Amino acid sequence: MSYETVTERIKLILSTVEGVYNIHTYLRDIEDEKKFEQAFKIETPQGPLLACWVMTRKAVPTTRPSVDANALLDITHSIEIQGMYSLQDEKQSELDFQKIIDNVLQRFKTKFLLEDDSGVALTGIIRTSELSIPEIGYGQFGNMFVHFCRMVISVEERL
């Protein structure tokens, strides 16, 4: 399995959460303001919304479960997911963003092997950690102020 396979499955799971839009399996930022808005703003019934979820692998620790040099190798993909959402105080966007975070946690709660909606796990996965959210706050994405969260999930697989 590869980083691409793991992040595509995480993207698939995230895409089923209400309020989660623009999911990318790599870090993104666009310097040109017009191109930035084209890439990350969406139209909703409530008006335009800046929303983006990006991810990257932060580490890949490995262990060899036996002494045999030709034996299997256990690796752990440490994936960081960053979510950004328009900061619109007049629309109480903080409450919307916190609800989305709760929905993401709920969605990943039973994804021990990153199962898809039909229950099929990724081959080779030994276990998936609980989704952890070490940071929620405000930030700047491009030239826009946003609600921000950083989520971390580890996916252990046997090669």
Image (spheres, grey):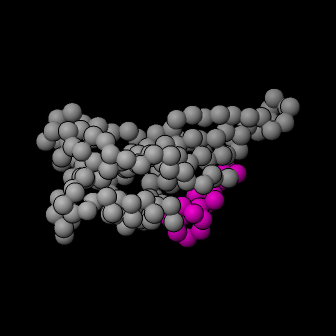
Is 114 part of what is drawn in magenta? yes
Figure check: 2 above or below 101:
above
Q: Quadrant of the C terminus?
A: top right
Q: Can residue 99 be seen in this snapshot?
A: yes
| x and y percentages locating residue 12 in the rendered image | 45, 58
Give me the residue at 31% from left, 42% from top: 139
Figure check: 19 above or below 26:
below
Of all residues, the one furthest to the right in this rendering is 67
Q: How many marks?
A: 0
Q: Front-most of 89 and 158?
A: 89
User: Is 159 left or right of 70, judged from the image as shown?
Assistant: left
Q: Front-most of 54 and 6?
A: 54
Give me the residue at 32% from left, 45% from top: 138
Q: Main secondary structure of the magenta part?
A: loop
Q: Front-most of 32 and 115?
A: 32
Q: Quadrant of the N terminus?
A: top right
Give me the residue at 18% from left, 48% from top: 38
Q: For residue 97, what is the image quadrant?
A: bottom left
| x and y percentages locating residue 9 in the rendered image | 50, 54
Q: Can residue 7 be seen in this snapshot?
A: no
Figure check: 18 above or below 41:
below
Of all residues, the one furthest to the left in this rendering is 34
| x and y percentages locating residue 132 in the rendered image | 54, 51
| x and y percentages locating residue 37 in the rendered image | 18, 46
Q: What is the magenta range?
A: 107-126
Give me the residue at 21% from left, 43% from top: 144
Q: Front-most of 4 and 35?
A: 35
Q: For residue 71, what is the image quadrant?
A: top right
Figure check: 108 above or below 118:
above
